[in-house]
Amino acid sequence: MDLRTRVRRPARRSRAHGGLAAHLREPTQVVFLALLGLVAVGWALVAFDGGQLLTMESVVGIQQRSAALGIVAIGQTLVILAGSLDLSVAYLISLTSLVAAEIMAGQDGNIWPAVTAVLVISSLVGLVNGLVITRLQVHAFIATLGVGLIIKGIVDHLYDGPAGEVPASFQVLGYSRVGPIPVSAMLWAGVAVVAWFLLSRTRLGYRIYAVGGNEEVARLSGVRTARVTVITHVLCSLCAGIAGLLLAARLGAGTPTVGTDGGYDLESIAAVVLGGTALAGGKGGVAGTVGGVLLLAVLDTIFNQLEVNSFAKDVVRGVVIVIAVAVYARRGTRRSA
Amino acid sequence: MRGIGKSFLGVRVLSGVDLDVAAGEVHAVVGENGAGKSTLMKIICGVHAPDEGTIEIDGTPVSLGHPLEAQRSGIAIIYQEFNLLPERTVAENVFLGREPVRRGLVDRAAMEEATARLLDELGEDPFGPRDLVKRLPVAQQQIVEIVKALSMNARLVVMDEPSAALAEHEVELLYRLIGRLRERGVAVVYISHRLREVFDLADRVTVLKDGSRVTTLPIGEVTPDELIRLMVGRDLGTYFPPRSAAAGEVRLSLRGAGNDKLRDIDLELRAGEIVGIAGLQGSGRSELAKAIFGAEPFTAGEMTPSRPRSVREGVAMGIGLVTEDRKAEGLVLRQSVRDNALLVARAVRAGNRAGVRDLLERVRLPAARQEQEVRYLSGGNQQKVVLVKWMTMAPRVLLFDEPTRGVDVGAKAAIHDLMRELANDGMAIMMISSELPELIGMSDRVVVLRDGRIAGTLPAGASEEAVMRLAAGEGA
């Protein structure tokens, strides 16, 4: 979203937005610039290696790889902006993939009941997360980790392998595409647009920023802060549920480890932070997160094409995330100085 | 005064304080630290409920049990530290929690228009409604607060030390803003230490002392000297340990020292001497202690034996600092008394770890209490632990910032005795206190700060009036 709204007075414009360097003040721009740079460098490296980075196949691959993480990360952006955090998403994804596939049981007619069930269960999990944080005053880190473990315990008790069956008509969500754009990517884009709209155009969005920015200020301005926190957790869990549906569609079945194997909890937080949203909340937005997710996916694609081993891949990801946040921190202090 | 009358009658939690404010009036509330100004203000704003007494607006009694109720009754408050979201725009801050909506969506245009209109009405618009608050200088952030108050149709604005964060030249803007509020018929309660502002702005002034109202006077019927006497006027019956004979060698000296908060500081601390530092909030008292200690180092001038660039260097020079906020800066609350007392000794090589048990016993914290977590101790005993923490390294210079804040009378006397004892043992001591009787009773010499500079130095036994006059900047 556009955080650098136009400034009314030219006198201030020159001070606030002078020169190219100043244009890079906002992390959102930094991340997209980094994305562009990475594509360029990756393209050169892969070309040098005798391949081509931006083939139809790899572009589709990048989008598909990003879609599930992207949707989770959008939800994560909302909670982080409100000053919270959700570590239960990975477990919830596993749970919802199973719920979806079990209820569908290969029947076209069961798709809608399954989707409804997933959305209801996700909302409930989000509600529990939110209430534990606001009513029981448990720190979000522990509250959502605890709820996540409870889900994991239930799932592990009931399943020890893939279960259920997703009908072919629902697998469309996972595989088909319109031109170069997979349906899953459109879903991701849809979720992102809704979240962007929510943050920039609704009262709730404004209050999410206020609560994350300074809860006391928000409270003294008449914002019901607990309610905002609970709602963002419900929305975040809904996003995880949608990701669970998407992964079930892709795998054709539910899997008890699909969420944790994908590392959706920590990776979604990493993507949010990479996108320039402050981990403490109150600052950032959806656009940066989309950039962060794409950056991670492009990085993946480059490594795959270069056939670098996966350990080196993780090292580079780690370095990228740490450097990004260090860069934002420096900009932040220089600006306020 | 004509128009709306507002009265807050007999809010007796402060033992029967009466205050009435008329529309378009600026009513100053003055008093020493701890006189009850902030409590009174919090009652007006609905943060605390009064135990006794009534509050009336336009003649109707109201109950202000919650900040929101006060807001709805047309009372806005501008806190000392601003209540704004730095990462959001001016308009977003002004309408926080009350965003206008159209068809379910926030009406940005209406919000920004209304903000721009209020800015225009104020005649203060060095910025637009879309600017991020963090990009505005502090003085201009105050404009945002005032616009926020106006957007709520506030009829009473309470300002708590609004000039504390402002530089000299920025105060003019504040004056203008208050003038505009007055023109609009808004009543203003102005709480300030700075007497000049009170005389410049107020129509009437209410003096609080020890939780009760001394008097309310039209500003024209009182002189600064009289006002100071009214604020201070109490007898010095308290006991303080006798002063020592003579000061010894110079332990530390400053020549023209300064940083972004302090300027041209000349000061000598001698062995065996207690130097008191007086000044209003924001005059640079704590900053001076932190600069000498190396926590917020001096960037200019000389300091002998040397100028520390970090706390570590300060400690290596034998300087200790008993900080103002012992819970946040002085102690690890969840660790034992012993561990806390050893904080410094463990950090520096010269620390005397073995002697810590004796030192704790010397301040009457027997072995049985030494394993307790510090948070279970009373304020006075906690402060003794902080003292022992520094005594383990036998400092040459020990700086005290509000050493007896939140400490009961008995422990206070014990700490005073201990401070004098340490001075008699040859330590150079500097003490900051907002409590003038304490400062004057303890110090061999009182240095008064104002706006980051030394306003003057007074000998032992100076009067409170003399100190206040220097601190508030009223020519003698």
Image (spheres, helix red, strand yellow):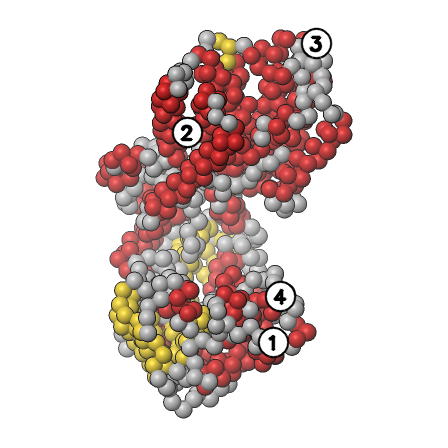
Q: Which mark is residue A1?
A: 2
Q: Chain of mark 3?
A: A
Amino acid tagged 2: Met
Q: Please tell me which residue lies in front, B6 or B412.
A: B412
Q: Chain of mark 2?
A: A
Q: Residue at x 43, y 84 (%)?
A: B426
Is label 4 in contact with label 2 (beta carbons under 8 Å)? no
Amino acid tagged 4: Ser
Q: Which residue is mark 4?
A: B336
Say which of marks 2 and 1 sits in front: 1
The reply to whether residue A193 is in sight is no
Say which of marks 2 and 3 sits in front: 3
Residues tagged by mark 4 and mark 2 found on one chain of the structure: no
Say which of marks 4 and 1 sits in front: 1
Q: Earlier in the sequence, mark 4 or mark 1?
A: 4
Left-right relation of A92 to B115: right
Q: Please tell me which residue lies in front, B116 or B257.
A: B257
